Amino acid sequence: MPTELLFREDAYMRNAGARVVHADERGIVLDRTIFYPMGGGQQGDAGVLVRTDGQRIVIADTRKGAEADSVLHVCAPDAPRLDIGESVALELDWDRRYALMRLHTALHVMSCVVVAPVTGGNIAPEKARLDFDIDMSLLDAERIERETNAIIARGIATETVWISDEELDARPELVKTMSVQPPRGAGRVRLLRIAEVDLQPCGGTHVRNIAEIGAIRVLKIRSEGKRNRRVEIGLVG
Ligand SMILES: [Zn+2]
């Protein structure tokens, strides 16, 4: 049974109610969730499930389940087993998620400053990176930082748009990330649009306006192989 993905419509939901659909030693499946499962380079969410008697089950990680759109909430092996059908209150570790949203959106902006095919990426709460297929001499930390922050300062709203698989096929230039092809088969693909800056397929969580990123710092630039020139960034404040 697919999980209703509440974060997909509203990435700012910190609390929600849900029912337990399945629970075993691997984790808990709910009928709906605000927890983002690891994917597209973005780490899975953490938080707490609260039972009606107040007992708190710590969720250390969130992963995709075996079925499409099913989400597995990963708890400690010795956590109490939940009952099928039981109601729980979800509490997201918001500080952690908000950092992920700011850094994730920052990568969208940076991918328009460094114009090259993206060969990899990762988003953690304290830092994020993109790998590019580009000559090292073209990566200047000071320039990347300055130009990325200049775009962020324009304070542009982000927007989720959906297009059909056929429309995406007709516009292959939208797909910058060579290592992660957008999910197919559902008939439609989710895109993130930052007007006049970026438009690309993405299933992750983003801030509503790029001004919320604040500013970024380039932490490191190094070569991880000929086609993987890695640019790592962090948030300033
Ligand atoms: Zn994204």
Image (tube, rainbow, N blue to C red):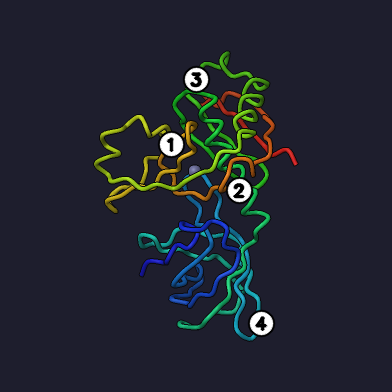
On screen, 34 above or below 86?
Answer: above
Check if mark 4's residue and mark 3's residue have beta carbons within 8 Å. Answer: no
Q: Quadrant of the C terminus?
A: top right
* SS state under label 1: strand
Disc sitting over residue 199 in the figure: 1
What amino acid does circle 2 point to?
Leu
Mark 4 or 3, nearer chain start: 4
Q: Where is residue 90? Give x, y as percent.
A: 58, 71
The quarter holding residue 69 reads bottom left
Mark 2 or 4, nearer chain start: 4
For label 2, the residue is 100
What amino acid does circle 3 point to?
Ile
Query: 9 left or right of 141?
Result: left
Between label 4 and label 1, give the one nearer the viewer. Answer: 1
Mark 2 or 3, nearer chain start: 2
* SS state under label 4: loop
Q: Where is residue 145? Give x, y as percent.
A: 65, 26
For the residue carrying disc 4, how many other residues have a C-alpha within 10 Å: few (<14), some (14-19), or many (20+)? Answer: few
Disc sitting over residue 134 in the figure: 3
Between label 2 and label 1, give the one nearer the viewer. Answer: 1
Check if mark 2's residue and mark 4's residue have beta carbons within 8 Å. Answer: no
For label 4, the residue is 54
The quarter holding residue 218 reads top right
Mark 2 or 1, nearer chain start: 2
The quarter holding residue 216 reads top right
